[in-house]
Image (spheres, rainbow, N blue to C red):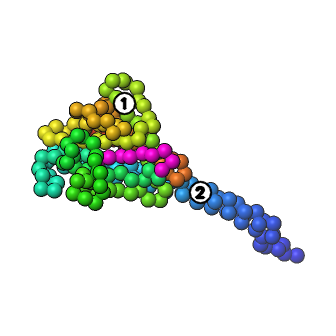
Amino acid sequence: MIGREGFTLIELLVVATIMIVISAIVLANNNRFGGVVQLEELSYNIALSVREAQQYGISTRRFQNTFGVGYGVYFPYQSGGANDTYATFADAITRNGIYDCPQPGTSDCELVQSYTMSGGYKINDLCVTPFSSSTETCGHTRIDVLFQRPEPDAAISYDGTVCSGGCAQSARIQLISPRGDTMNVYIYDNGQISVSSH
């Protein structure tokens, strides 16, 4: 008698179960990887916005028929808020080193461009290292980074404080994904900008 060839029902169910488990693991890791990649891309886009403001600040770019103004980036943070926006600005009206926009949409607004993060990505925290201390402090309500000719150095202000030449030696903008992954954009008073997961 010739033996039967093929698989039993139990063998097929075991193989199918193993394939389902492996597929679920791969898909779960793929979604996490995709979220991390998007968060990293967002971090680099913010760093590029800061670099663009730096280039505008040390060039002779015109803003509302005014030349020689400083350009910067404004990062707002509100506890419990959406925290998914930031803006580039020209310090042309008050010339105080921080973003001022008493009436949005009017000529006395220093807004150059507003950016909105989508997909649940947002600013998680704003941290600075003040000149008066070497210890980083977090939980700030805003950070303003300004670049003014002729130097590429950054004047970093926080919480709406106006300081001649800046208030802090560095700033850290922490971004968070919907899954809880974080990335940081670092801005230093010497004009250096970097992105890191630490």
> Looking at the image, which residue is at 39% across and 53% down?
85
Amino acid type at image mark 1: Thr
Say which quadrant the N terminus sits in. bottom right
Question: How many numbered marks does the figure carry?
Answer: 2
| Spot occupied by residue 164 in the image (x, y as percentages of width and height) | 22, 32
Q: Position of residue 140 (x, y in %)?
A: 41, 38
Image quadrant where residue 20 sits:
bottom right
Checking the image for residue 28, the label placed there is 2
Name the front one of labels 2 and 1. Answer: 1
User: Position of 11 compared to 159: left or right?
Assistant: right
On the image, the x and y values in percent for residue 161 come to 31, 35
Report the amino acid beneath label 2: Ala
**Span colored in magenta:** 73-81
Q: Is residue 186 magenta?
A: no
User: Is 145 drawn above or below residue 81 in the view shown?
Assistant: above
Residue 19: where, in percent of width, then height? 67, 63
Q: In this view, does 134 lie to the left or right of 16?
A: left
Q: Name the residue under label 1.
A: 129
Q: Which residue is drawn at 43% across and 53% down?
A: 84
Visible residue check, residue 182: no
Which image quarter holds the C terminus? top left
Going from the N terminus, do you reach mark 2 or mark 1 first? 2
| 34 or 61: nearer the viewer | 61
Disc 2 and disc 1 in contact, CB within 8 angstroms: no
Is 158 or 178 nearer to us in this picture? 158
Left or right position of 68 against 156: left
Q: Classify 10 Å Cα crowding around label 2: few (below 14), some (14-19), many (20 and above).
A: few
